[in-house]
Amino acid sequence: SLDEHDLDYTLLSDSAAVATRAFGLAYRATNSNTGRLEEASGRDHHILPVPAAFIVGTDGMIKFEYINPNYKVRVKSAIILAAARAEVQ
């Protein structure tokens, strides 16, 4: 992503599911799609995250969080931007 886009923020990846497990957001995929999951992630742990978004302040504290186990319901970008702007002020 860094090579393709001019990002002015840090984008983190958790392919080993270390943070996902630590945040209590991990669940194990148990359906027939685990082969596709392994192919896409390069991992065989079959762990998927509950969809979540966090804003972490420069002090390392979580300033905003959105967690919803229904993967079809995502937080609106306007809400994340408002939370980020509130943190900057």
Image (cartoon, grey):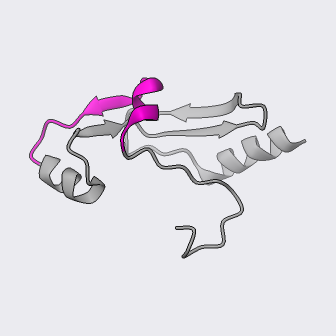
- Decide which of 78, 45 is in the foreground and name it: 45
- Decide which of 26, 78 is in the foreground and name it: 26
In the picture as drawn, the residue positioned furthest to the left comes out as 32
| Residue 51 % position (x, y) | 43, 40
- Decide which of 73, 33 is in the foreground and name it: 33
**Is 77 within the magenta?**
no
Residue at the image point whose x is 42% and y is 23% from the top: 24
**Is 18 within the magenta?**
yes
From which residue to which does the magenta span run? 16-32
- Decide which of 71, 19 is in the foreground and name it: 19
The relative height of residue 40 versus residue 45 in the rendered view (above or below) is below
Residue 84 found in image quarter? top right
The relative height of residue 53 versus residue 28 in the rendered view (above or below) is below
| Residue 2 % position (x, y) | 57, 68
In the picture as drawn, the residue positioned furthest to the right comes out as 89
For this view, does 28 lie left or right of residue 74? left
Residue at the image point whose x is 48% and y is 45% from the top: 74
Residue 58 found in image quarter? top right
Where is the C terminus found, in terms of image quarters? top right
Residue at the image point whose x is 64% and y is 53% from the top: 10
